[in-house]
Image: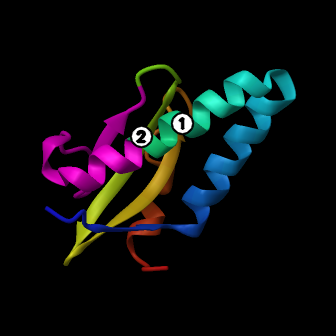
Amino acid sequence: MPRIVVRVHAAAAEEAEAAYDWYAERSITAARGFLEELGRAVEVVSEAPGRWPQYRAGTRRYIFPRFPYFLVYRLLNDQIEVVAVAHGRRRPGYWRSRLQRVT
């Protein structure tokens, strides 16, 4: 079964890059681990987007197993939009304003 198309909101891409940079300043191994986990998150969500629990404002959430981050996404027609790569302990729901516009 083909995977659904995944689009990443520009701000979510910036969050992922900032997290990678933060880890890379401390440990390139950790930074690579973060990227692997992010890639795995996108992969499993694209394979079965309805599997992950409903979250806020019509989104769903995939929690990273090894890092304090989660992927916030929503289904839009025949695509998945990654709305945020959010840190689990910072500013809950800050990304909601991204739901009004499609990038």
Image point (41%, 22%), residue name: 65
Secondary structure type for disc 1: helix
Magenta residues span 41-64
Question: What secondary structure is found at the residue carrying circle 2?
Answer: helix
On the picture, is 24 further left or further right than 71? right
64 sits to left or right of 30:
left
Q: How crowded is mark 1: few (under 14 residues within 10 Å), some or many (20 or more)?
A: few
Is the residue under label 2 in contact with that under label 1 (CB below 8 Å)?
yes
The residue identified by callout 1 is 36
Q: How far apart are marks 1 and 2 (CA)?
A: 6 Å
The amino acid type, in three-letter code, at marker 2 is Arg
- One can see residue 35 in this view: yes
Q: Which residue lies furthest to the front in this view?
A: 1
Q: Could you tell me how many numbered marks the image carries?
A: 2
Instruction: From this view, report whether residue 70 is shown above or below residue 80.
Output: above
Name the residue at 43% across, 46% down: 93
Q: Quadrant of the N terminus?
A: bottom left
Give yes or no for residue 45 being in the magenta stretch: yes
Q: Please report the residue visible at 41 percent of the width from the left and 40 percent of the height from the top.
A: 40
Q: Type of residue at label 1?
A: Glu
Q: Taking 25 as reference, is 75 above or below it?
A: below
The type of colouring in the image is rainbow
Residue on which the image places disc 2: 40
Q: In this view, does 95 lie to the left or right of 2?
A: right
Q: Position of residue 68 (x, y in %)?
A: 52, 24
Pick the residue in front: 44 or 13. 44
Q: Is residue 12 magenta?
A: no
Nearer the observer, 86 or 26: 26
